[in-house]
Amino acid sequence: MAEFAYQVKIPKERVAVLIGKKGEVKKQIEETTGIAMEIDSKEGEVNVIGDDALMLYSTREIIKAIARGFNPEIAMLLLKQDYAFEVISLPDFEKKSQFMRIKGRIIGAEGKTRRIIEEHTECFVSVYGKTVAIIGRSDSIHIARKAVEMIIKGSPHSTVYQWLEKMKRQLRRRELEDNFEDHLRYPKDDKKLDNL
């Protein structure tokens, strides 16, 4: 089989997180994915090498997620088929104070805003450097992204929270309808109804 390779550049301060204590994180990622990683800690460059193109892509996404501030345990969720990873670049401002204000609005007092976004969407949000990164299920990650974009554009927090409440109800309703339809299609499988 053909061997593929990617190179990923990560912030130098995130290299230690990718390697882990005594190399445990690197080893776990390599064993779980079957993809080899060569890490240049001085340059922050990671080469990923393997013959499974899909697993190579997933490994690259895990590395990018760790580079964007996620802990390895959360980044490993990207191995699940229904999870996705998105990065939003924060706008460039002339003044650093404006940039810090936007980051502060996304995080909120004592992390309140980020926590509310995470709770309502069941996603994970990381504000790191000049980016906001999101890991979550494919059906809800776009809601988290929209909430972050609303905050960046200056929407009041209360408006964003109300919108998130509405989206959470819609997601829950859709989930219940899907479970009910599954039950009608497969009436013997009553285990699906346990979630209702």
Image (cartoon, rainbow, N blue to C red):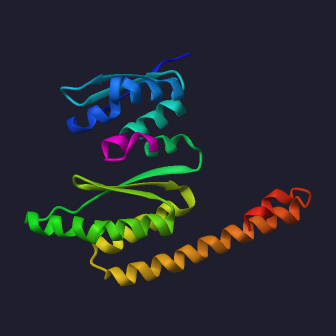
Give residue 33's position: percent from left, percent from top. Answer: 52, 28
Q: Residue at x 54, y 55 (%)?
A: 137
Q: 71 left or right of 12?
A: right
Q: Which residue appears at 23% of the width and 67% of the height?
A: 104
Q: Quadrant of the C terminus?
A: bottom right
Left or right of residue 101, residue 190 in this image: right
Percent position (x, y) of residue 140?
53, 63
Say if 166 sits above or below 78 in the image: below
Q: Position of residue 71 (x, y in %)?
A: 38, 44
In the rendered structure, the answer to whether residue 72 lies left or right of residue 52 reads left
| Outermost residue to the left | 95
Image quadrant occupied by the N terminus: top right
Main SS of the magenta part reads: helix
Foreground residue among 81 and 109 = 109
Q: Is residue 59 magenta?
A: no
Can residue 5 be seen here? The reply is: no
| Direction top: furthest residue | 1
**73 to the left or right of 180:** left
Q: Which residues are magenta?
A: 64-73
Residue 66 is one of the magenta-drawn residues: yes
Front residue of this view, candidates 19 and 144: 19
